[in-house]
Image: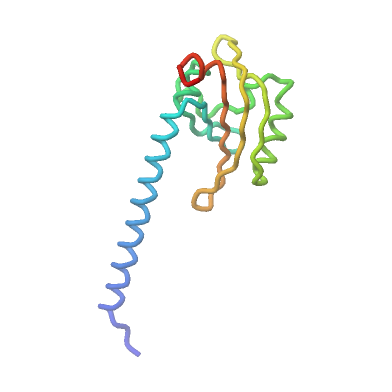
């Protein structure tokens, strides 16, 4: 049976059009997610293998550092040493699909400490697992007029 080149070409065009739509949809969702992350008053960190790969403006304000200075940091370097192991355990449990909570402090620039509640959750996006850690500071929410 001979190969019909027109049929192959049509299938290739349809496949490429579908793939383009999926990529555009994914890019749109990603833009919406980042807009949401930047608009919430909660400090959000996304990390992989303990290295921070992204954070929002609320987190940069709490740490008193730019996002560029924070990206690449070990997430546990900003937590008091006595809380590192409990927070590691919390994040490990979150990687098993269970949302976890813990209270600690985050150490910012010049040693400023902010009391926070930590919420950890693993999120699957297109088959890639990322750990999202949210630091909720009542003091920051109060100072910015959210509470």
Q: Residue at x 53, y 31 (%)?
A: 45
User: How many marks do you count on the picture?
Assistant: 0
The front one of 11 and 2 is 11
Residue 33, percent across and down? 42, 39
Residue 101, percent across and down? 66, 32
Q: Is residue 87 above or below residue 116?
A: below
Q: Residue at x 57, y 26 (%)?
A: 135
Q: Is residue 130 above or below residue 75?
A: below
The image quadrant that residue 139 belongs to is: top right
Residue 117, percent across and down? 62, 25
Q: What colour scheme was applied to this rendering of the protein?
A: rainbow
Q: Residue at x 35, y 90 (%)?
A: 1
The front one of 105 and 12 is 105
Give the farthest residue toward the bottom.
1
Q: Is residue 115 above or below residue 101?
A: above
Residue 8, percent across and down? 31, 75
Left or right relative to 141: residue 12: left
């Amino acid at each position: 049976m001979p190969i019909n080149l027109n049929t192959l070409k049509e299938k290739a065009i349809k496949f490429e059009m579908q793939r383009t739509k999926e990529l555009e949809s994914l890019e749109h969702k990603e833009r919406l997610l980042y807009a949401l992350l930047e608009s919430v008053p909660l400090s959000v960190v996304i990390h992989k293998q303990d290295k921070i790969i992204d954070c929002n403006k609320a987190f940069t304000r709490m740490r008193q550092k730019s996002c560029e200075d924070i990206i690449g940091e070990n997430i546990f370097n900003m937590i008091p040493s006595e809380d590192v192991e409990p927070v590691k355990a919390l994040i490990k449990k979150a990687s098993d699909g269970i949302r976890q909570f813990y209270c600690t402090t985050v150490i910012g620039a010049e040693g400023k400490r902010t009391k926070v509640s930590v919420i950890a959750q693993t999120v699957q996006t297109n088959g890639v697992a990322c750990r999202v850690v949210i630091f909720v500071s009542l003091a920051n929410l109060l100072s910015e007029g959210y509470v």
